[in-house]
Amino acid sequence: MVLNHSCLLKSVNIVDFQWDILDSGIHLDSDMSIDGFFSFYNSTLHDCLEKHAPITTRTISVPPRVAWFSEEIKCAKKEKRKAERKWRMTKLESDLSQFKRKRAFCTSSMKKARSEYYSTFINDNSSDQGKLFKASKYLLNLKNDIQFPPHSDAFKLANDFGNFFDRRLSILGVNYLI
């Protein structure tokens, strides 16, 4: 998440802004020191600017980058978008073919980087099945949410599960008590 502070200077009415500066009384007074004048000047201009173009704060969510994403892929995506914009403006066949080439390069670069990253990950973690299962769950977008039937009392639900399995085991003739 990034905080972005900005003001809309293009929307300022210049005439009103000039009148507010003139009305503020900025002038060189012989009784005021240079430091005092500059302090007064800065605060007055800041107040006028805040009145006409207040600073706004926006929160911009930046999604996390995947581990295999590189500068090369970033540049390829940028070039692809540039070629697409050019083709959409000109509608020329040559621009379309250029866009398709850049799109294909971008797609193949991402596939290659992703494949290399996960191959290396699997080779490096081949002895740790926990990491491999966690990675496969992430890749397959599997959630680890345990779903219980609707209940109002957790203690009663646990006893119901115990009774259910007790009945099942007794039907099968399994003696689980030692």
Image (cartoon, rainbow, N blue to C red):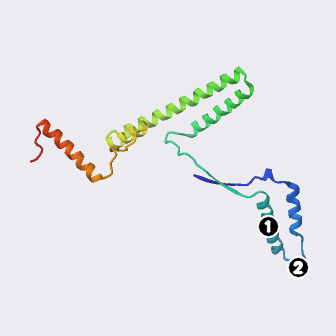
Name the residue at 55% across, 30% down.
107
Q: Where is residue 22 drawn, in percent x and y?
A: 89, 65
Instruction: Determine whether the residue tagged by mark 1 lies in a helix, strand or loop.
Output: helix
Q: Secondary structure at mark 2?
A: loop
**Label 1 crowd (10 A; few <14 / some 14-19 / many >=20):** few
Q: Can I make out residue 107 in this image?
A: yes
Q: Position of residue 54 (x, y in %)?
A: 74, 58
Q: Quadrant of residue 33?
A: bottom right
| Residue at x-position 14% and y-position 37% | 171
- Asked if residue 65 is positioned above or below residue 51 in the image, the reply reads above
Do the CB atoms of the residues marked 2 and 1 lie less than 8 Å apart?
no
Is 156 left, or right, of 6 in this rendering?
A: left
- Residue occupying image coordinates x 84% and y 74%: 34
- Residue lying furthest front: 152
Q: What residue lies at 13% left-to-right and 36% top-to-bottom?
A: 172
**What amino acid is labelled 1 in the image?**
Asn
Q: Which numbered dot is residue 42?
A: 1
- The three-letter amino acid code for the residue at tag 2 is Asp
C-alpha separation, residue under disc 2 versus residue under disc 1: 18 Å
